[in-house]
Image: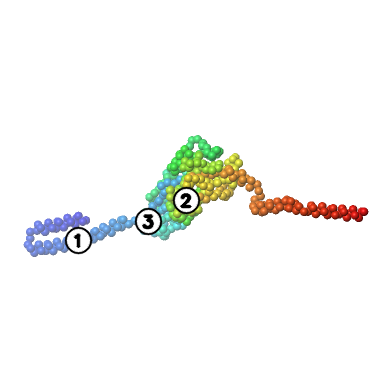
């Protein structure tokens, strides 16, 4: 329209220049020209305003939903899915999300409903979404095969919209393989004794550990929320670590914890841990600088020891301890027994950080602990107090030497009186 407007102006101008009439006509034509010029300016401004209004209307966002997924996760992980909602023009809420088959949805925000373990929805016929972002959690099966998995969903947020539309943005994520298979069975070295790990798995040496020394590797990920108690749980038979738990002091997003079960002592230590070693381990929580007193509090490690191993090596449960290697030496952590079942005894240890660890039995103190178990429980100081009393009673005759002399004199006196009467 602007181009035509300019062309018309030049056409009018050319027409005026070519007119060969008297001055009155020229004056009249000039007035007409000025009138037409003002008219074109007004029309041009009106068209420009209309163009801006129509462009703004075209650029205005329609109701939409965009899904956010993590790029990848591990089998057994629980992830959070985010639905970002464009609320412009929304006047109803119909949202339905379907996760991959076998995955389990939980914790939908804003009064969402779980239709089945694979489906979650939000439904408000006469009102817009309650927030600009909905979330829900999804748990990946522990036996999920590595690969790419697809999410799909539909929404309808406006009466005037063309019905149900697909939820777009991120629709796929990967499930990773956290272990690399080893074709043959391996033995975990235990400082002179060994325990079969069954069909073991090797891990990558990305932590700094020698690849060939890793018998099994387990990785878990959690979203770190300030003020929450974070617990990573492990249930693979090859892994003696049952859980790692701490209190998060601030939000930190998704943080992974890695447990490496080793065949021998860690490549990052110079000497073996004290005692008879049950398992050598590397434990890492987050990246360097995360597991500090500024970010976490009260970190503990839960682990288990096989009763069969204790029996085989004639070890008493009281001798079990968790050692951590730091500052160039092995440090005995405060370890307590928390339970047992038919196959395992369960322990928990406090730790100031994460690095190479070893579950060991203190063989030097084990004999003493067995002897103590033979005494009545809770005898304590009462038994010790009775012992000196018994000693004093046994030594009492040695402390009264005059009694025998007195008795002798009395006997002699009685014999003298008796003989006197007889005479």
Q: Position of residue 306 (x, y in %)?
A: 57, 43
Q: Which residue is mark 3?
A: 86
- Above or below, 290 relative to 209: below
Q: Are marks 2 and 1 in contact (CB under 8 Å)?
A: no
Nearer-the-camera pick, 423 or 348: 423
Left or right: residue 310 compared with residue 47: right
Residue 8: give its label.
none
Nearer-the-camera pick, 74 or 234: 234
What residue sits 70% from the left and 53% below the top? 389
Q: Which residue is mark 1?
A: 41
Q: Return the residue found at the far top.
A: 184
What residue sits 26% from the left and 57% below the top? 51
Of labels 2 and 1, the one closer to you: 2
Q: Earlier in the sequence, mark 2 or mark 1?
A: 1
Where disc 2 sits, the SS reads strand
Colouring of the image: rainbow
Residue 105: give its label.
2
């Amino acid at each position: 329209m602007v181009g035509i407007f300019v062309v018309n102006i030049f056409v009018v101008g050319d027409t005026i220049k070519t007119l060969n009439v008297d001055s009155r006509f020229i004056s009249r034509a000039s007035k007409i020209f000025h009138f037409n010029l003002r008219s074109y300016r007004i029309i041009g401004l009106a068209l420009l305003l209309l163009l801006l209004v129509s462009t703004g209307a075209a650029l205005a966002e329609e109701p939409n939903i965009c899904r956010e997924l993590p790029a990848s996760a591990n089998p057994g992980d629980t992830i959070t899915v985010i639905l970002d909602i464009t609320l412009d023009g929304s006047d109803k809420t119909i949202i339905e999300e379907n996760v991959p088959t076998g995955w389990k949805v939980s914790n939908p925000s804003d009064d969402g409903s779980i239709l089945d373990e694979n489906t979650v929805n939000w439904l408000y016929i006469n009102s817009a979404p309650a927030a600009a972002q909905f979330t829900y959690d999804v748990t990946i099966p522990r036996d999920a095969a590595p690969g790419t998995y697809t999410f799909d969903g539909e929404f309808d947020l406006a009466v005037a919209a063309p019905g149900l539309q697909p939820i777009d943005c991120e629709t796929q994520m990967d499930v990773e393989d956290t272990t690399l298979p080893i074709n043959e069975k391996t033995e975990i070295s235990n400082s002179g004794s060994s325990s079969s790990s069954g069909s073991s798995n090797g891990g990558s040496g990305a932590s700094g550990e020698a690849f060939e020394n890793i018998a099994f590797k387990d990785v878990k990920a959690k979203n770190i929320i300030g003020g929450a108690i974070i617990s990573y749980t492990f249930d693979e038979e090859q892994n003696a670590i049952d859980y790692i738990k701490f209190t998060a002091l601030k939000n930190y997003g998704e943080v992974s914890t890695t447990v490496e079960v080793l065949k021998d002592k860690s490549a990052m230590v110079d000497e073996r841990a004290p005692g008879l070693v049950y398992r050598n381990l590397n434990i890492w929580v987050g990246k360097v600088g995360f597991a500090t007193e500024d970010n976490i509090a009260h970190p503990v490690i839960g682990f288990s020891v096989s009763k069969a191993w204790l029996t085989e090596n004639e070890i008493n449960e009281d001798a079990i301890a968790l050692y951590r290697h730091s500052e160039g030496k092995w440090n005995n952590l405060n370890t307590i027994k928390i339970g047992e079942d038919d196959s395992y005894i369960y322990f928990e240890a406090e730790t100031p950080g994460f690095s190479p660890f070893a579950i060991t039995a203190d063989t030097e103190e084990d004999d003493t602990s067995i002897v103590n178990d033979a005494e009545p429980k809770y005898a304590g100081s009462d038994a010790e107090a009775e012992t000196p009393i018994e000693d004093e009673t046994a030594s009492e005759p040695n402390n009264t030497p005059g009694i025998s002399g007195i008795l002798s004199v009395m006997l002699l006196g009685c014999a003298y009186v008796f003989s006197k009467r007889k005479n």
